[in-house]
Amino acid sequence: MKRVRPLQTAAVVALATVSALGLVACGDTVGYSDGSGDRLRGKELFVQGCGSCHTLADAGTTGEIGPNLDFAFVQSRIDGLGESSILQVVRGQIAYPVVDPSTDAPGMPANIFEGQEAEDVASYVASVAGLDANGEPIDPANPPKPTPPEGGDTDGKSIFASAGCGGCHTLAAAGSGGTVGPNLDEAKPSLELAVERVTNGQGGMPSFKGQLSDEQIQAVATFVADNAGK
């Protein structure tokens, strides 16, 4: 992957912020944040809808399909761009995602969050991305390791939701309509295959080993295998 130099990264963030402000001036406020987001709710939504694709240490997520959000914004923090600027960038990316990138990588789903939910997620990400537990910019050479979510829930349906599976997969029994990964109602994976994929991942799907216990992996795999296509 081509590395973007720090100044280039900061310039991209600055340009995106200016673009967002320009949209507001033209009367388009869909991708502009008014600062009303609920960060606590935003964290919950991020884990459920974004964590399977993005790494964000504060959220305890390790997705590798999309950009590592800590790395994406740390240089902007170091260069002095404030949280409000990052907020506008994230809000704009939620509103106007690259659905079909020119590379072979999966795109970001359109309309993954809208309205207040989009505000909440953008506010949360902007408040923590690129920062360590003390609120200081992370050291890119020694990034913090995401902390797995607490709790020992072994209900497969709730794990499917809390682990962010629905952000990538369609499964009617879970009420999810993600399109980044396979449609599970069509794929109808066996229990053995579901356990293997959740444990080790494949392609763009991350491994959940270390994030979920063996019991939780078995529970969510059983939920998928028992309900896919029904």
Image (spheres, rainbow, N blue to C red):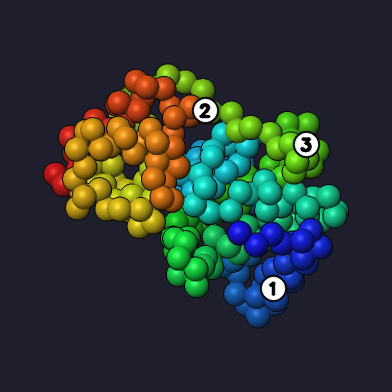
Question: Badge 3: few (under 14), some or many (20 or more) residues near its Cα, within 10 Å?
Answer: few
Tell me whether circle 3 and circle 1 mark residues in contact (CB < 8 Å). no
Name the residue carrying label 2: 149
**Which sits earlier in the primary sequence, circle 2 or circle 1?**
1
Q: Closer to the camera, 41 or 172? A: 172
Q: CA distance from mark 3 to mark 2?
A: 20 Å
Residue 148 percent across, percent down from the top left: 53, 28
Tell me whether circle 2 and circle 1 mark residues in contact (CB < 8 Å). no
**Which sits earlier in the primary sequence, circle 3 or circle 2?**
3
Q: Amino acid at mark 3?
A: Gly
Residue 163 percent across, percent down from the top left: 43, 36
Q: Secondary structure at mark 1?
A: helix
Q: CA distance from mark 3 to mark 1?
A: 27 Å
Query: On screen, 102 above or below 197?
Result: below
Q: Which mark is residue 135?
A: 3
Q: Could you say which quadrant of the image residue 144 lies in?
A: top right
Residue lying furthest front: 1
Q: Secondary structure at mark 3?
A: loop
Count numbered badges in the picture: 3
**Which sits earlier in the primary sequence, circle 3 or circle 1?**
1
Residue lying furthest left: 230
Name the residue carrying label 1: 19
Q: Residue at x 19, y 53 (%)?
A: 186
